[in-house]
Amino acid sequence: MNFDMTDEQRMLVDGAQRYVRERYDFETRRGIIKREKGFSTQHWHDYANLGWLALAIAEEDGGLNGSDVDVALLMEILGEGLLLEPVAECAVLCASLIGAGAKGPLRESLLMRIASGEMLIALAHQEQTTRHEYDRQIHTTARRVADGWELSGVKQRVFFGVNADAWLVSATLEGKPGLAIFLVEAGSPGATLDSYELISGSHGADLHLDRVIVRECSMLIAPDKGADALEYALDRALVANGAMCLGSMEGVMAMTADYLKTRVQYGKPLAQFQALQHRMAEMFVETDLARSILFGALAALESGDVERRRFSVSGMKVVLAKAYLFVTAQGIQLHGGIGTTEEYAVGHHYKAAVVFDQRWGDSDFHLQRSSTDQNQVEQPMGGALHA
């Protein structure tokens, strides 16, 4: 496989690195958490102007028709900078769900508005009885009425729900198996939010739907296609977030190495102590392993093989979550007391690792999912980046 980046990919990476370095340093991030509830409208519009929000959207829908590899290259840089805004959640997850629906004016409008930064859409799927985003045991209902559909239920753990202009709500239809996906606009009568801050600095919300009326065309995906469309969109978003984790791990590696080179103890830099060199070597091994497993998941996504995709993406989640927690925890340990403070970045990387470990399905679920077809799927041996 060819691991060299194309000229376009190199421009994408260079532009993202420059933006994070010049416009989104750690103090800027802390300010967004304190003053802007974990989301910056100005930066969101910047992302749209840079083409990031259009990257995963098809060209015919107003996007740039980028591949999952292109998205991963971008997300790796955003992860190193610990960007708070939901690029993967909106421009990959929700855009994929909307793109799986039937073509029509509403679908076209939504995708174009996501690409232009005019609209932020969040997925509202989890409920009190669900363990994670992949769980399909939901109780929110949709009932046909004269003006369209009436939705009732409570959605919990709606990430970035308070920042969203609309939500993609999963619901069941009476007498029909499966789940449908509906568009519910923020401010709709009967729709209320309870917002709360997450340990990563972003915000989540619980969405209460009390007989909310939406238009007939608001059913974006019918019940017979909703489950498969949701699973595929979640897999794409999970891989994108996996790339963010890899970037975060690389950021921790870099700042820890710099700290050990400059911090002097017993008359010499900490980097000269063999025990600490071994710690850094272990962090490097875990980071390199995470990169390899991410490449395998990217290759599986591009293969079009559903079973291979499930196996590889779930395997990636398990391995990467463990590696991410290890690297960030070691980063704190090697920094000592300063690593535990709010004013230093390494602790924030660890908080992001804790959130990732519990989001997108926990390790128990993904171990079961990846082992279901383990004997039927050939695990990829190499990477996925190609020109």
Image: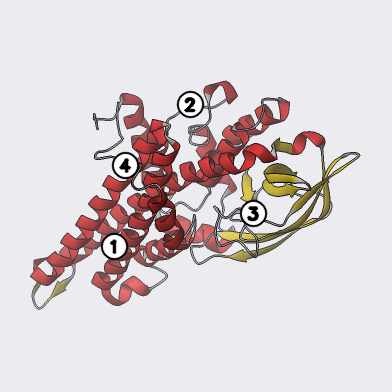
Identify the mark at residue 327; answer none if there is no mark: 1
Q: How many marks?
A: 4
Q: Which residue is mark 3?
A: 161
Q: Is residue 71 above or below residue 154?
A: above
Please say whether residue 79 is visible from this viewpoint. Answer: no
Q: Amino acid at mark 4?
A: Gly
- Residue sitting at 26 percent across and 54 percent down? 287
- Name the residue located 57 percent from the left edge and 40 percent from the top edge: 228
Dividing the picture into quarters, in which one does residue 377 lie? top left
Regarding residue 133, the answer to whether it shows in the image is yes
Q: Is residue 207 above or below residue 175?
A: below
Q: Are marks 3 and 1 in contact (CB under 8 Å)?
A: no
Quick one: 357 or 228, which is closer to the camera?
A: 228
Q: Is residue 245 left or right of residue 4?
A: right
- Identify residue for label 2: 65
Q: Earlier in the sequence, mark 3 or mark 2?
A: 2
Residues under numbered marks 4 and 1 in contact, where contact means CB atoms less than 8 Å apart: no
Q: Quadrant of the C terminus?
A: top left
Residue at which label 4 appears: 296
Q: Amino acid at mark 2?
A: Asn
